[in-house]
Amino acid sequence: MTNTGMFFRMLFSAVFRRRSRAVMAVVASLVGAATLFCLAMICIAVPQQMNEEMRAYGANLIVTPTEAGADGKAGIDKAMVEHTTEMVAAKGSEKHAAYRYENVRVNAAPYVMAGIDVSEVRNLNHHWVVDGAWPSEGKVLIGRDVADAMGLQVGSGITIGYRASDNASSSSSGSSGTDASGTAGSSDSEAGSSASGSADSTGTAGSADSSNSSDSSSSGATQSQTPSDQPTQDGRVSSDIMDTSGTEFRVAGIVDTGGSEDSIIYATNADVDKLTGTSRGVDVIEYSAGAEDLNALVQSINDMTSMHVKAQQVTKITSSDTRIITMLQTLFWIVSLVVLVLTLVGVGTTISSIVSQRRNEIGLRKALGASSAAIGTEFYVESAMYGLIGGLLGTAIGYGLAQWLCVAVFERSIGFNWWLGAASVVLAALVAVIASIPPVHRATRIDPAVVLREE
């Protein structure tokens, strides 16, 4: 029999004779590998899953016009919307919705009306709570603040008037792109300062964050004109401001988000075109972009000056997303460190027990001429074998746990990461070998004379 054959025969004989200890060592490695692999899979999957979940609560990128188009009207035309959307989609998944804002009157009171594509807005803003239905031809969706201010319910009639004079400042504010003080889309006030293109300088645009909602109930989230802004005739305020005529609509539904959406009237683009008598570009495009580097995407859009649009991150959404993911990853590293220490202790204790049981055998082998290196190699290989078996079983169990957790929490399955699986098995074996170093070191220092004398 060759030396190699004798080596493995002695190894497997030692394992078989101490099956209970071997099982304990395998279980210790198994628990560590399962826990670490499960945490690693979740840590890899969670950022993507969290990003998708956060994106369901509104846009993380908005695009607004920087100047008037070639026809002299403010807004982003359809071709530019498509081109910008292609740029965003090239960097990852995307959902978007475009808004056109107009100043209108309801019972002589000023409000903001948004022309939307219903399917786009519904797909982007899953967090909107709509009582009733979304807008359709001849029907509008009104914000909760608007409904409360006018005592409207689903099915009520509402007369909306449009005056070109109310929107006279739209072109100038749209061309500058930075005069508006409203908010755009689901962004915070920082991002929305340039988004209310066609609304006047104090209008509220899109679906701003809820930090501005406290003001919306008192002001109706509408553009309250100053005396200098109001239409005048012969030096006096025109009586046209009290004109309550307009187009009759029905209230299809009431949206309640707790944000500035509650102060806006939403209608289909066709109804807004019919009401204003004109068809023009949109004032804000909101994107829920899946790009890994959102800053680079914003920069690439802004660098193309010929596009006449400006992109901004919605910092409230992106910062929250980043903060949550960072906290989860920090927790992963802390738990992983604890699991590694516990695995080292468990495997080390088991190997130490095995060495103690084989003390007499080690002394006899050394007396017969076995070297310390040979004895140490045998124990290291035995420990690595425990680690490999435990790593393989633990990786399989860890993947099952990770799959179950992701389905339970995110309702989505995850694929097996083969590179991570291989790393998990190798790490389990390495940890087992490292844990066995102290007891093996003690074993190689056993004095055979002392051991044999005790016998």
Image (tube, helix red, strand yellow):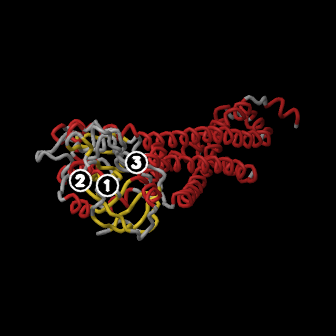
| Residue shown at 46% from the left, 46% from the top | 218
The residue carrying pointer 2 sits among few (fewer than 14), some (14 to 19) or many (20 or more) residues within 10 Å by Cα, namely some
**Spot occupied by residue 49 in the image (x, y as percentages of width and height):** 47, 52
The nearer-to-camera label among 3 and 2 is 2
Q: Nearer the viewer, residue 133 or 81?
A: 133
Check disc 1 and report the residue beneath it: 105
Check disc 2 and report the residue beneath it: 163
**Spot occupied by residue 390 in the image (x, y as percentages of width and height):** 62, 51
Q: Is residue 276 left or right of residue 57?
A: left
SS category of the residue bearing label 2: loop
Disc 3 marks which amino acid?
A: Ala
| Contact check, label 2 and label 1, Cβ < 8 Å | yes
| Residue shown at 25% from the left, 60% from the top | 272
Check disc 3 and report the residue beneath it: 221
**Spot occupied by residue 152 in the image (x, y as percentages of width and height):** 44, 64
Q: Name which of mark 3 and mark 1 comes first in the sequence.
A: 1
Between the C-alphas of marks 3 and 2, the distance is 19 Å
Q: Nearer the viewer, residue 454 or 190?
A: 190
The quadrant of the rendering that contains the C terminus is top right
Q: Name which of mark 2 and mark 1 comes first in the sequence.
A: 1
Between the C-alphas of marks 2 and 1, the distance is 8 Å
**Residue 246 placement: quadrant:** bottom left
Q: Which mark is residue 60?
A: none
Disc 1 marks which amino acid?
A: Arg
Give the answer, above or below, for where 151 lies relative to 172. below
Disc 2 marks which amino acid?
A: Arg
Any part of residue 415 in sight: no
